[in-house]
Image (cartoon, rainbow, N blue to C red):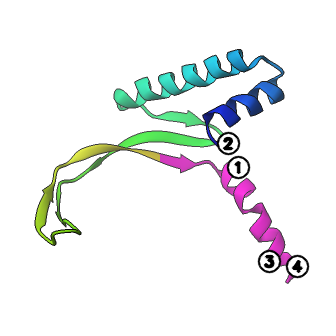
Amino acid sequence: MNKSELVKAISQKAEVTNATAQAVIEAFTEAVKDSLKKSDKVQLIGFGSFSTVKRAARKGVNPQTKKKISIPAKKVVKFVPGKALKDLVNADSAAKKKKK
């Protein structure tokens, strides 16, 4: 699903216009970005949480030249799905296991 498909789905489920749904999505993503930029955690109960974690500096290899390189430390965004989302995603595989 891309952004325009998400806008359409939200506008239908929330019974609002596409413009309103797009404004809400943009406001949501901006709020999440602002929080993560400040290293705050964004937690949506039942869906999941977004946070930043520090990735240590490490050594790597350029796959084209096989030359060793130094990869600097940086912060990366991490998403951890909530229990309800995990259960929803895994519901099909659990149902298939029961049938066997």
Please give the residue where the numbered disc 2 appears in the rendered image. Answer: 46
Give, as a three-letter code, the residue at label 1. Ala
Q: How far apart are marks 3 and 4 (CA)?
A: 5 Å
Check disc 2 and give the amino acid type: Gly
| Disc 4 and disc 1 in contact, CB within 8 angstroms | no
Q: Name the residue under label 3.
A: 97
**Where on the picture, by quarter, is residue 27?**
top right
Question: Which residue is disc 4 drawn over?
Answer: 99
Q: Is residue 23 toward the left or the right of residue 31 in the image?
A: right
Determine the CA span between mark 2 and mark 1.
5 Å
Q: Earlier in the sequence, mark 2 or mark 1?
A: 2
Residue drawn 71% across and 57% down?
89
Q: Residue at 69% of width from left, 16% of height from top?
A: 19
In the image, residue 11 above or below residue 46: above
Number of numbered labels in the structure image = 4
Q: How many angstroms separate mark 3 from mark 2 (CA)? A: 24 Å
Kindly indicate whether the residue at mark 4 contacts the one at mark 3 (C-beta within 8 angstroms). yes
State which mark lies toward you, 4 or 2. Answer: 4
Packing grade of label 2 (10 A; few <14, some 14-19, many >=20) is few
* C-beta proximity under 8 Å, tags 2 and 1: yes
Residue 2 spot, x, y in % from top left: 62, 40
Sequence-first tag of 4 and 2: 2
Label 4's element? helix
> Which region of the structure is painted magenta?
79-100
Q: Nearer the viewer, mark 3 or mark 2?
A: 3
- The residue to which callout 1 is attached is 84
What kind of residue is marked 4?
Lys
| Distance from Cα at disc 1 to Cα at disc 3 | 19 Å
- The foreground one among 42 and 63 is 63
Cα distance in 3D space between marks 4 and 1: 22 Å
